[in-house]
Image (tube, helix red, strand yellow):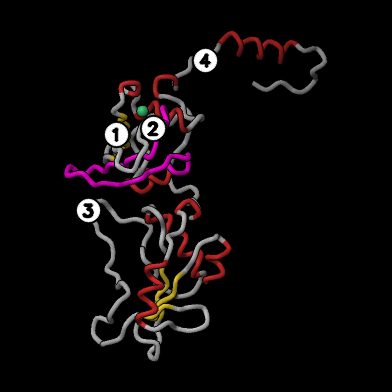
Amino acid sequence: MQDIAADMRLRLHLFSSNGIERGGIHGWMFFDRPLASERVFSLLKTIVGGQQIETFPKQPSIPPTGFGNWMRVFGRHYKRAEWARYWGGRGWLTAEQTIDAILRIEPDDADLVPQVRQEIRITSRPIYRGHRRHFAETAESLQSWLESKGVTVKAIKPCHDGSTRLILGLCPFHPDHGDGPNDTSVVVFWTPSGPRFCCQHNRCKSFKWRDLRAKLDPDYVPHDLELTPINWESLARKVVQRYADPDDVTPKRG
Ligand SMILES: [Zn+2]
């Protein structure tokens, strides 16, 4: 499993979980920023293959009113005086060495985690009317979609009203907006009724979610352009050509 992770330039850190005599190993992966649970879930499924190994998260997503799963962190065993030990490649480190090993762990680049394909029901066909509704089922799927379009989501904050703030690293319209770790001026809100975009800078005041989506998704057909009128003249010309060609001996169909 470490090799599978290494092929993706990711590291799987192994810890003994029940004392090294009793067996039991926990593998940990560390990333430099939060990732959508469905993306991590998919990664872990790839790494464990078909083996019966428990993963956290246990599911790709949880409903808005649901909650995730308890998990044990490394440290002292919850019942016995056994301490987590780090796998150093050739053997288990001592408990003291394990502390140093933990402190030296560098988180992996979250961008190296593969995107989950077709995770969002999104279509650019004209029959798709709602540019808000049904676009992103969860804040995580919205995050994944934004990331798949090259937008950095640097923080996620739940709001009291049930919506979620996805704070963007840089404004997609003006990259000088939102720069810096504490700048929270560029936000995409996930709400149960659909996403909203808000950049607090003057130059971006007029940009709404639909503008952002059109910018990120060139196939996106804005709501009011979907009902393109049929060009009757062009259609009529095609019909006339088709039936007026004397060399065309194929049977005509009604
Ligand atoms: Zn902006």
Question: Magenta stretch containing residue 106, yes or no?
Answer: no
- The amino acid beneath tag 2 is Cys
**Residue at mark 2:** 171
Query: Judging from the image, what secondary structure is the residue with disc 3 in?
Result: loop
Q: Furthest-left residue in view? A: 160
Label 2 residue near ligand 1, CB within 8 Å: yes
Question: Magenta stretch containing residue 162, yes or no?
Answer: yes
Query: Judging from the image, what secondary structure is the residue with disc 2 in?
Result: loop
> Which residue range is magenta in the image?
147-175
Residue 167, given in percent of the width and then of the height, sits at 32, 41
Residue 55 horizontal side relative to residue 46, left or right: left
Tag shown at residue 230: 4
Tag shown at residue 65: 3
Label 1 residue near ligand 1, CB within 8 Å: yes
Neighbor class of circle 4 (other Cα within 10 Å; few <14, some 14-19, many 20+) is few
**Residue at mark 1:** 185
138 or 44, nearer to the observer:
44
First in residue order: circle 2 vs circle 1: 2
Q: Is residue 104 above or below residue 214?
A: below
- The amino acid beneath tag 4 is Ile
First in residue order: circle 1 vs circle 4: 1
- The amino acid beneath tag 1 is Ser
